[in-house]
Amino acid sequence: EPFTKPVPRDPRIKRNVCRDCCQAGGCLGSAPKVRGIPNGSTPMPEEEEKDLLKKLEGNWHIQVLEKMPKRDGKYRIQDPVYDQVMVQDNFYVLSGGTRIGFTMKQFFHFYQGPKQEIYCDYIGSQLVKMDFEGGEVEVKNGLGERLLWQRTWKKDGSPPPQQSM
């Protein structure tokens, strides 16, 4: 059942600071419930993962299309926390937004769901639409928000940069 799972701990570390912070009444007041990765999902094959990471590599602007769903009659987060993302290798770094001066580094963990949907982290963030040539990727994060990752050139209304041969 979506949005009934606690924020998972990364199995590689003993302590998950975000989850501990939320449970202690930190940024969200209490640990949010997340979508999670559905039963029947499998890790993405290595070659497909490499291809996807190559397409995601670089800088993106984040635009919120739909805020986190209301729970208990209110939205949990009012403003986009970060508005920039930089993808490199198998991780991404969030920056800007209301967290100016702060960054957050997260690693991708790609899974293919039972209906061939693509999940990119342990909380169940899903890559919904991917138009790499058009400079846009739509993400429905594990908290239920719909986000648009947009290349800077697309956001600025410029044509895509020319690829050198």
Image: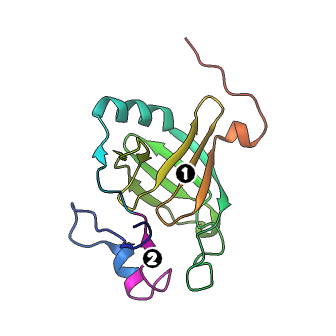
**Label 2 sits on what residue type?**
Pro
Checking the image for residue 32, the label placed there is: 2
Task: State the residue position of label 1.
Answer: 139
Residue 25 part of the magenta-drawn span: yes
From the viewer's perspective, is residue 47 above or below residue 6?
Answer: above
Residue 161: quarter of image = top right
CA gap, disc 2 to disc 1?
18 Å
Between residues 64 and 115, which one lies in front from this camera angle?
A: 115
Disc 2 element: loop
Q: Residue 8: x, y in percent?
A: 32, 68
Disc 2 vs disc 1: Cβ atoms closer than 8 Å? no
Residue 137 part of the magenta-drawn span: no
Question: Magenta region: which residues?
Answer: 22-35
Quarter the N terminus occupies: bottom left
Disc 1 element: strand
Residue plotted at (35% across, 46% down): 114
Residue 83: quarter of image = bottom right
| Magenta portion: prevailing SS class | loop
Residue plotted at (34% across, 80% down): 20
Residue plotted at (40% across, 29% down): 51
Residue plotted at (49% across, 66% down): 143
Q: Is residue 25 left or right of residue 76?
A: left
Residue 100: quarter of image = bottom right
**Label 1 sits on what residue type?**
Val
Q: Is residue 2 left or right of residue 17?
A: right
